[in-house]
Image: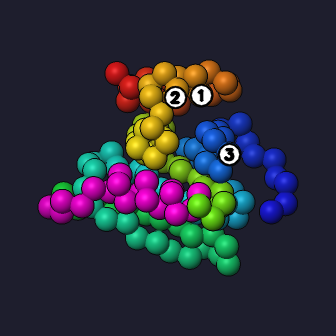
Amino acid sequence: MTALFLPPYMYQMIDHLYLSDLRGFVYHDFFDVIINTSSLRYGNSGSITKYTLSKKTIQVLVNVQPITTQNVLEDLCNELLQATVVHKKILLYSDSYDTSAKVIYTYLTTRYHFTKEDITRMLLTRPYSNGLLSAFRTIMK
């Protein structure tokens, strides 16, 4: 991948994982996997659908279906894991940081066994927006 200047509203959480608001979609060519988490606001059950956006970019959309018992957060964490294993760059984006932060928090605590303190230290290492910090604080209460 060629070097690309990413705007300040796109935050690198860990090596391969980035988070943005809806404006981040414009940079989808920079990423191998992009995940729209906006629908998670309506619940954690449902399914995911994958679409090919370009030769290298796959988009994952969340379909919220309240009658299913499938945990979408678990499915999204598995998608993140699969993409991470093969060193793919991932972007989570949403109309608010709350839902993407929820996915990242779940991923870090289940996959890497991060504690709240670990995530707090991670958030202190870079200048994140107040909206993103607020989303993580809400989740970690």
Mark 1 in CB contact with mark 2 (< 8 angstroms): yes
**The disc labelled 2 sits on which kind of residue?**
Ile
> Magenta stretch: dominant SS?
helix
Q: Nearer the viewer, residue 67 or 119?
A: 119
The magenta segment: 67-84
**The disc labelled 3 sits on which kind of residue?**
Asp
Mark 3 in CB contact with mark 2 (< 8 angstroms): no
Whether residue 1 appears in magenta in the rendering, the answer is no
Whether residue 78 appears in magenta in the rendering, the answer is yes
Residue 15, quarter of picture: top right
Horizontally, is 87 left or right of 136 in the view? right
Q: Nearer the viewer, residue 83 or 31?
A: 83
Residue 84 position in % (x across, y down): 59, 57
Disc sitting over residue 71 in the figure = none
Residue displayed at 75% across by 46% down: 6
Residue, disc 1: 122
Label 3 crowding class (10 Å Cα cut-off): few <14, some 14-19, many 20+?
few
Residue 47 position in % (x across, y down): 31, 65
Residue, disc 3: 15
Tell me which label, 3 or 1, sits earlier in the chain.
Answer: 3
**Secondary structure at numbered mark 3:** loop
Q: Nearer the viewer, residue 36 or 118?
A: 118
CA–CA distance between discs 3 and 2? 15 Å
Disc sitting over residue 119 in the figure = 2
